Amino acid sequence: MALMQPSIARRTCLAVTLFVASVSMAETTTTAPPTTAPAAPYLGTFVYRYGPVAIRAEVTSATRLKWTILEGMPEPGKSEEETVERREIRPDIFLATWVEKSGAIVTQVSDFTQMRATSTIAANGKTMVFDGRIERLPQ
């Protein structure tokens, strides 16, 4: 077996070293945690409008929601605080679901880019689906 000349061996070693270093750098830059987390678009105070129905939603965390009926439904002013399960479907689109005190199950998909929402309410053996728009209120 022929031995490599020293200059070829050095070039090969240098090439391997550079390759390993570049792979290590790529792994480091792609796996490093972000320095700041983006603000969640679902946080804040909103009015959800479904035709004549308007509901104010105050979202203080990923799991807390307070809603108040503003107009278009019986019992304007009725309000409840809910524990919400929330999942990001894709950037700026979130699925939220909760069970109200009445036993009604609510599922809501909110698109904070288009400012549109679809909500489903299942209660008393009936299911209702509402499409509407979202308005962010100033803080």
Image: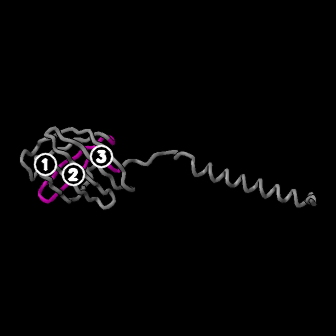
Q: Dot 3: what SS?
A: strand
Q: Quadrant of residue 26?
A: bottom right
Task: Answer with left or right where residue 128 lies relative to residue 87.
Answer: left
Q: Which mark is residue 44?
A: 3
The residue depicted at 31 percent of the width and 40 percent of the height is 63
Which label is found at residue 70?
1
Q: Is residue 97 left or right of residue 69?
A: right
What is the C-alpha distance between the residues marked 2 and 3? Answer: 10 Å
Distance CA(mark 2)–CA(mark 1): 9 Å
- Magenta residues span 41-62
In the rendered image, the quadrant that contains the N terminus is bottom right
Q: Secondary structure at mark 1?
A: strand
Residue 122 % position (x, y): 16, 49
Expressed as whole percent of the image width and height from the top left, the position of residue 25 reads 66, 51
- Residue underneath mark 2: 47
Q: Position of residue 18 (x, y in %)?
A: 75, 55
Q: Residues within 10 Å of mark 2 (few under 14, many from 20)?
A: many
**In the image shown, does 125 or 46 lie closer to the viewer?**
125
> Label 2 sits on what residue type?
Val
**Which sits earlier in the primary sequence, circle 2 or circle 1?**
2
Circles 2 and 3: CB distance less than 8 Å?
Answer: no
Q: Residue 57, which numbered label?
A: none
The x, y position of residue 139, in whole percent, is 29, 46
Does 41 appear above or below 11? above
Residue 98, quarter of picture = top left
